[in-house]
Image: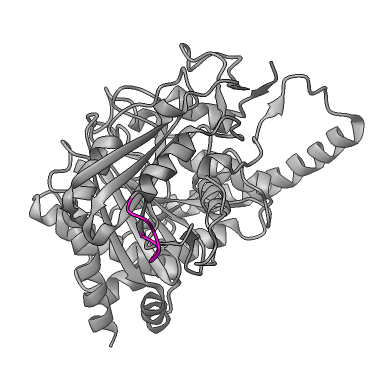
Amino acid sequence: MKAHRLPVTDAMFLYGETRETMLHVASLMPFTPAPDAPPDHLRTLVDELRGARHLAPPWNLKLRHPDSLRHPLQAWVEDPDVDIDYHVRRSALPAPGDERELGVLVSRLHSNNLDFSRPPWEMHIIEGLECGRFAFYTKMHHALIDGYTGMKLVARALSPDPAARDTPLFISTSLPVRAKPESEGAMDAPGLLALARAQLGAGKGLGKALLGLARAARAEHDDLVIPLKAPKSILNRPIGRNRRFATQQLDIARLKAAGKKAGATLNDVVLALCGAALRRFLLELHALPDRPLVAMLPVNIRPKDDPGGGNAVAAVLASLATHIADPAERIRAIVASTTRAKEQLQGMSRQAIMAYSSVLLSPVGLQMMKMTSGRVRPAFNLVISNVPGPDVPMYFRGARLEAYYPVSIPTHGMALNITVTSYAGTLNFGFIGCRDTLPHLQHLGVYCGEAFAELEAALA
């Protein structure tokens, strides 16, 4: 049986899997049905999905050693007999289901571990939403895909043409596996020479970046966020297995207009809104730290037109300026922080960026251990990711995709994750966290929308 060894970056997501820290990612996609959709169109879709027999990677890949996730020879192998009835499921809300009930269902679905004896994914077709709407909730383990790859899968299964009725099923779309065949031989001499040159260049860039970190650590005032500068907070406690999910959707044109007035990028505006929402949320819990919260921002370092597969991200740290009450002052502080973080990466090779990211993330292991999370100073307080999506409306066999909400991963020491995805002129926020550690987490979605109105008013 053909096997593909997991790269270390992918295998790490298996090593961290526990009952409480479930390292799967997901998406929630609500649809408006096609005008000509028959009453039984979803039943027909489910029957078609269950009738599929030849699945493409990554849908047909399972672990060779499912009972030992930390096995040193762990690899992906093809499952010749995937049980579609297990993976594709049909759910319904009490009609007419509203957004809150949909969020509760997704929270419950995201609170369960995947079965590693099978290909690690599930697809839930959710019916019963208002006005005949429906939704897809699809989750896969992070060892198999990252956000970039997940978006590629979605794009291949949707069409910009509302009249198209022959788009492929989700489980029929494929992406390459970012892993090496076990039979792959040793690198040849030219390859070793190229690797040596790359490592030499990475060393030079990394040395310069580390010097910048050392200077920032000694400076009284420096906008560069360094590891272990984040305050202790309620966000960095141990978590339970239960999740809570909330969403928000905002207009990108308005977000960019606000950013232009503040001299900020779209990402800066996202951080400002997240910082404002968190400030209000933590104030209500009487748990706002005196020092600003720090976010880790994953950075996609794939080459242009990379087909996807596996994980390929670096990291930077940025302040959320949660200690500042004024929205205009807050976004200016965030711009200063992200500007310094970008300066650190300028001129660095991909290898150097990865090495630098490893330095930034090196304290995280202690933070994510159940026995020490909440007791040690965190490397950062939460992760905020931004994954680009289609910039035009997309359809699945005539049904219009209304939004694309990412659903990511809380862990011990990071009880909240915020991921945003752009889609058809909108920015879609997915807030996922520990239900027990962060009560009333769903308020964050509401506060994010209200923070945007406050920022626009402050910049007017």
**Quarter of the view holding residue 451:** bottom left
Q: Residue 179: x and y, percent?
A: 66, 31
**Residue drawn 42% across the image and 30% down it:** 87
| Quadrant in the picture for the C terminus | bottom left
Q: Which residues are magenta?
A: 32-39
Q: Residue 62: x and y, percent?
A: 54, 23
Magenta stretch, main secondary structure, is loop
In the rendered image, residue 35 lying in the magenta stretch gets the answer yes
**Residue drawn 51% across the image and 63% down it:** 390
Whether residue 383 can be seen here = no
**Does residue 60 appear to the left or right of 228 in the view shown?**
right
Residue nearest the viewer, comparing 46 with 429: 46
Residue nearest the viewer, comparing 373 with 73: 73
**Does residue 92 appear to the left or right of 349 in the view shown?**
left
Residue nearest the viewer, comparing 293 with 81: 81
Q: Is residue 331 above or below residue 151?
A: below
